[in-house]
Amino acid sequence: MTAEISTTEPDQIRAGDSITWLKTLNDYPATDSWVLHYRLINSAGKFDVTATASGSDHLVSISAATSATYTAGKYTLVSWVTLGSERYSIESEQIEVLPDLVAQAAGYDTRSTAQKTLDLLDAAMQSQGSNA
């Protein structure tokens, strides 16, 4: 069974999964040698992806092995096209990389950062109460 190929960028991806989408850019067709690029970037790092031509469209394909190297977190997904020395920005949007739960060697803490902080504060307050 082949997964259906999306025609829009995802707002979430899971590290360790195969990820594919097809982008149509009427002003920058692949048949005219335009190349579509993406960058996932945040304060911790960046990941670059280059699309390949699929007729006049741009096919983005990230292998499971490549996405397995992605660190979970929130990123900005930036896209641009190039043709020789020309470069034009297309768009940017938020994307979240989810952790690779299949590859987890041990249990995974599903609590949000806020819940983890609240639990730590609660434990500290409980500890202070028992020391009084």
Image (tube, rainbow, N blue to C red):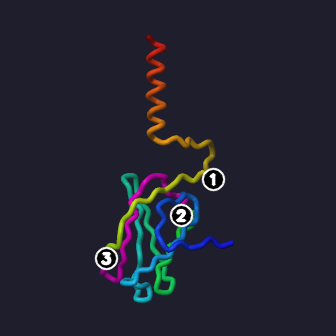
Marks 3/2 in contact by CB < 8 Å: the verdict is no
Would you identify the image quadrant in which residue 25 lies?
bottom left
Q: Is residue 21 above or below residue 17?
A: below
Rendered residue at 48%/14% (across/down): 130
- Residue flagged by tag 3: what amino acid is it? Tyr
Rendered residue at 36%/79% (across/down): 82
What range is drawn magenta here? 67-87
Rendered residue at 31%/77% (across/down): 87
- Residue flagged by tag 1: what amino acid is it? Val
Question: Secondary structure beneath disc 1?
Answer: loop
**Residue picked out by circle 2:** 66
Marks 1/3 in contact by CB < 8 Å: the verdict is no
Looking at the image, which is closer to me, 94 or 101? Answer: 94
Q: Position of residue 79 (x, y in %)?
A: 38, 70
Q: Which mark is residue 102?
A: 1
Earlier sequence position, callout 3 versus callout 2: 2
Residue farthest along the top direction in this orientation: 132
Would you identify the image quadrant in which residue 36 lies?
bottom left
Q: Which mark is residue 88?
A: 3
Rendered residue at 57%/53% (across/down): 100
Q: Answer left or right for 42 relative to 61.
A: left
The Cα atoms of the two marked residues, 1 and 3, are separated by 38 Å
Question: Secondary structure beneath disc 2?
Answer: helix
Locate the C terminus and report the quarter of the image it occupies: top left
